[in-house]
Image (tube, rainbow, N blue to C red):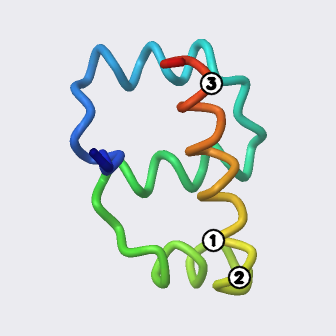
């Protein structure tokens, strides 16, 4: 099952923020994705390419997966 970040509860989001050791860019992207901002718009707001936003998104998902293994 593939969970989307917006599907996490607020307590789960607080836990992830405390435990995942996100970089500042990862944190910025994570916050926007929690607000259901499309990845393309996140890239634009962050002034990065879509491929960079996708790479950051993969790193976020990898860190989340490590917590739930």
Which of the two labelled residues, at mark 2 and mark 3, occupies the earlier sequence position? Answer: 2
Q: Residues within 10 Å of mark 2 (few under 14, many from 20)?
A: few
Using residue 42 as the reference point, say whether residue 21 is left or right of it: right
Q: Which mark is residue 54?
A: 1
Circle 3 residue: 66
Residue 30: x percent and y percent?
51, 47
Nearer to us: label 2 or label 3: 3
Using residue 20 as the reference point, say whether residue 2 is left or right of it: left
Please tell me whether residue 15 is drawn above or below residue 40 in the rendered image: above
Q: Residues within 10 Å of mark 1 (few under 14, many from 20)?
A: some
Residue sitting at 74 percent across and 74 percent down?
A: 52
Circle 2 residue: 51
**From mark 2 to mark 1, how far is it between C-alphas?**
5 Å
Nearer to us: label 3 or label 1: 3
Residue 50: x percent and y percent?
64, 84
Location of residue 57 by image quarter: bottom right
Q: Nearer the viewer, residue 45 or 64?
A: 64
Q: Which mark is residue 33?
A: none
Using residue 31 as the reference point, say whether residue 61 is left or right of it: right
């Amino acid at each position: 099952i593939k969970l989307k970040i917006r599907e996490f509860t607020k307590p789960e989001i607080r836990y992830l923020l405390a435990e995942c050791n996100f970089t500042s860019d990862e944190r910025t992207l994570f916050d926007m994705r929690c607000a259901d901002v499309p990845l393309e718009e996140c890239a634009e707001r962050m002034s990065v390419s879509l491929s960079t936003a996708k790479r950051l998104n993969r790193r976020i998902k990898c860190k989340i997966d490590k917590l739930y293994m």
